[in-house]
Amino acid sequence: MRSLPDCLLQAQLYPQWIEAIGVSNNHECRERVQRLLQRLPAPNLLLLRHFLCALWHIVQQSALNKMCAVNLGVCVGQSLLTSNPFGNPSPVPPSSQTCEEMSKLVPKLVAYLIDHCPDLFGDQTLRLLGAPAAQLIHHDDLHLS
């Protein structure tokens, strides 16, 4: 995703995303997030839906893989939302507030998108990459020879 000209959630929408995830009222937060999702270009939304589908399935196995939504948010947050488009670094270093937003609020936003993926995009989004495996492979079942 780093080869995209801009982050998936669009750098120009950064302030609105940060504001939306800071809303404490769950209904209002969801409404704001849905309005922002509608502002994304169609290719971004399509890729986002597929990416969130994969992340949602990873979270469903967090008891085995230790990757909860917040952990994934930390890992992929910078690829989904930054305050500057990729390849267009700001001439001014980010403020301490922006750094704090990037380290705390962006992962919180990504975790929200993962956790609410079925509500935001519909249950069919969870099947974009195929039907979930009927049976999990447990780490105890894996033996390296």
Image: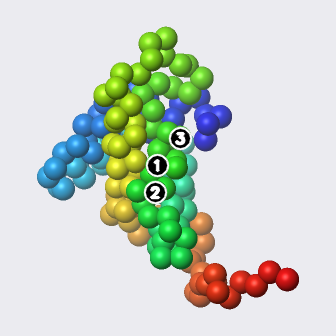
Q: Tell me, yes or no, whether the two marked residues, 3 and 2, touch with CB atoms within 8 Å.
A: no
Picture layout, residue 79 above or below residue 120: above
Decide: is 74 above or below 13: below
Q: CA distance from mark 3 to mark 2?
A: 14 Å
Closer mark to the observer between disc 3 and disc 2: 2
Residue at image position (16%, 50%) is: 24
Give yes or no for contact between labels 2 and 1 (Cβ–Cβ under 8 Å).
Answer: yes
Amino acid under label 2?
Answer: Asn
How far from the left and from the top, in percent, is residue 72? 48, 56
> Please, what is the three-letter code of the amino acid marked with disc 1?
Val
Label 3 amino acid?
Answer: Ser
Tell me the distance, in whole angstroms, between the alpha carbons under discs 2 and 1: 5 Å
Q: Secondary structure at mark 1?
A: helix
User: Residue 26 appears at what percent x and percent y?
Assistant: 18, 56
| Closer to us: 50 or 142 | 142
The residue indicated by pointer 1 is 74
Question: Alpha-carbon distance for marks 1 and 3?
Answer: 10 Å
Residue 145 is situated, as x and y percent measured from the top left of the image, at 85, 83
Helix or strand or loop: what does disc 3 sit on? Answer: helix
Rendered view: 143 above or below 28: below
Residue 46 showing in the rendered view? no
Pointer 1 local density, CA inside 10 Å: few below 14, some 14–19, many at least 20: some
User: Upstream in the sequence, badge 3 or badge 2?
Assistant: 2
Residue furthest to the right in view is 145
Which numbered circle lies on residue 71?
A: 2
| Disc ID at residue 79 | 3
Q: Earlier in the sequence, mark 1 or mark 3?
A: 1
Image side of residue 58 versus residue 94, left or right: right
